[in-house]
Image (cartoon, grey):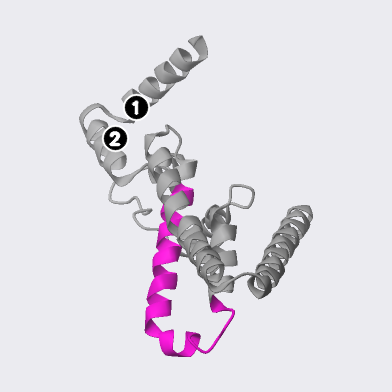
Amino acid sequence: MGVITVIAKRFDALIGYVSILIRIRKECMKNVPLMSNIVLSAFGGMCRPGVMLLYPLYASLRAIESPTMLDDQQWLTYWIIYSFMTLFEMSVWRILAWIPFWPYMKLLFCMWLVLPMFSGAAYIYSNMVRKYVKIGAYVGGKNYTEEQRKVLQMMSLDARSSVQHYIDLYGWDAVERAIKAAERETKRH
């Protein structure tokens, strides 16, 4: 429960900051000429694409270049969720047009998905998607032990097919020797 409490407090703080910015913007709108109003509205309109598209695009490019898979998972999940949200929006746009706070709800949700302090997309993937969607997770056909089956299930489809081909040629003992040799090599460095 501690993690959920921290997330809730951070989310409350974020909502508080957004509401303060909205109030400041409304106060500024009262006291500025029409041209400044247009500039402030344009800046508000640029904030959403920046949070929802530009930063995720930049972070996705960095994730592709990084050696770890965790950030890849975060950003692939973000783009999947953003795509579903866009399809939903396109489907019911006439209804959403009547909800004045929809753009702000979408912005807050995307901020939760995107910001590193929340990593909402990775949270959704690990706690919701992974439980129900297991694409390519079944390993069958051969007489593998349960431990061998678990090792093969952790691999990507391409790696798994290569390892299964190697097993067919040289046997499972050769795979275990290769794994032990790799472990020894990593301990050396």
Can the viewer see residue 146?
A: no
Q: Position of residue 80 (x, y in %)?
A: 41, 61
Q: Position of residue 99 (x, y in %)?
A: 55, 86
> Is residue 68 positioned above or below 48 on the image?
above
Q: Which residue is mark 1?
A: 175
**Label 1: how many residues lie within 10 Å, few (<14), some (14-19) or many (20+)?**
some
Residue numbers of the magenta segment:
73-102
Q: Nearer the viewer, residue 55 or 44?
A: 44
Q: Position of residue 56 (x, y in %)?
A: 45, 51
Outermost residue to the top: 188
Image mark count: 2
| Residue type at tag 1 | Val
| Residue type at tag 2 | Val
Counting residues from the N terminus, which is met first, the one under dot 1 or under dot 2? Answer: 2
Q: Which residue is mark 2?
A: 163
> Is residue 37 positioned above or below 78 on the image?
below
